[in-house]
Amino acid sequence: MFTLSKNSCLSTTLLVSLFVLAISLFFTTSPTFPHRLSLLARQFLPIRSISTSPTMTTYAKELRVAELAVQRATLLTKYVFHEKAKGTLSKDDASPVTIGDFGAQALIIQAIRKNFPQDEIVGEEEAATLRENKELSSKIWTLVKEARLSDATAEEELGGPIPSEEDMLSAIDAGNSAGGAKGRVWALDPIDGTKGFLRGGQYAVCLALMVDEDVKVGVLGCPNLPVDDSASLDAHSGENQTDAEGKGVLFGAVQGQGATSRPLGIGALGKSQPIHMKEVSSIADATFCESVEAAHSSHSDQSQIAQKLGITKPSVRMDSQAKYGSIARGAGDLYLRLPVRKDYQEKIWDHAAGDLIVREAGGEVTDAQGKRLDFGKGRTLRNNKGVVAAPRGVHAQVLEAVKSVLGSK
């Protein structure tokens, strides 16, 4: 029996080999060979063994988890946005912190730990203050639970309820990675543009994944930006904002796969569409964005650069990475953030997601010397000074003006 079985197997193998060879020879003479081979493979091979295009599969799960987690976190921030008393505190760096920051960080880190437990997280907040302020901690714990209940449809993918208030604090503290050039590291800013959030302007919930210091996934949730990608920015886009009907957009990007926008919602993700930076035929007609806070970016230098480029329209001053999202979809054109102090170092969570989204939408992002932003040096961009973001076709022209103004000082 053994001999017969063995010979039978050999015969079968020989026949299959001859068949495959004949089919291959036939298909290679046809202009539709790749398509036919793909169909043949789908019929005879297990799905997991098919080698599909990396652009169709790489980081798909990371993008989906990031988008769902950011969307869930915006539910909490939107609730707090309408509160008159937002729970403002003062940190060591004198920047305001709200209960929205802590709650959003807890929700997002929970989702990352469930799906990618080995990944590191560089988060802006830590829970020491909450451990001392039990009343504030309890209020945030209540909001975290309510946000989860409001978004129960995403629970399976993002994780069930955080078991206890102490677990919430532990999740917040899990954003304590030092970052670096090796491995998988998430950069999280639970509310970017906290001062804008407090004053009723623009803010963003920001999340990015870096792999060996290279940004692979970026997501921005901007509750106060219009859903309509064609809505242009004006001088008042950064003030007196609401998250009323027609507002709330979720930007996403994966390296090499382009950038998208979709409406912010609850539960299932809304329908996405690709976004692209607007072609600038005349730099004098460009709209440029800058930070509201003069302490964050040199308004005087940026004004001189605008004059050198012939731009006469007033700048659009907005808080947060909403500026990156706005120029990525063509609502604005340029984003300048120029250093106000020689010793100032930008935080990686303030730029990682927006940097990728703009580049995937057809833009170029560098520092004021023309170097790519370096996210592999820890929690800050210590190798970079300033940010210059523009469509690829005019970036060199903008950078030349930046260097000219800064070099004359």
Image (tube, rainbow, N blue to C red):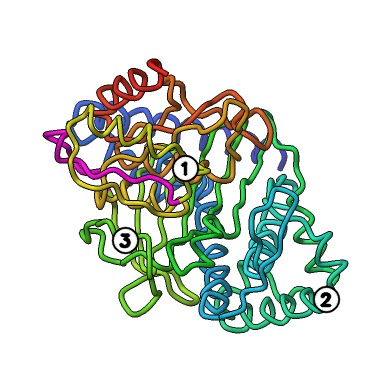
Name the element at disc 1: loop
Please indicate, yes or no, whether residue 19 appears anywhere in the rendered image.
no
Where is residue 54 drawn, in percent x and y? 44, 38
The earlier-in-sequence mark between 2 and 3 is 2
Q: Are marks 1 and 2 in contact (CB under 8 Å)?
A: no
What's under tag 2, amino acid-wise? Answer: Ser
What's under tag 3, amino acid-wise? Answer: Ser
The earlier-in-sequence mark between 1 and 2 is 1
Measure how far apart labels 1 and 2 are at the Cα level. Answer: 43 Å
Residue in the picture at 36% in, 48% down: 259
Judging depth in this view, the residue of 402 and 159 nearest the camera is: 402
| Residue 282 within the segment the image draws in magenta | yes
- Badge 2, how many Cα within 10 Å: few under 14, some, many 20+? few
Name the element at disc 3: loop
Q: Is residue 152 above or below residue 404?
A: below
Q: Is residue 130 above or below residue 257?
A: below
Q: Which residues are magenta?
A: 276-292
Residue in the picture at 40% in, 54% down: 318
Where is residue 330 drawn, in percent x and y? 24, 49
Per the image, the residue denoted by label 3 is 237
Per the image, the residue denoted by label 1 is 50
Judging depth in this view, the residue of 44 and 298 nearest the camera is: 298
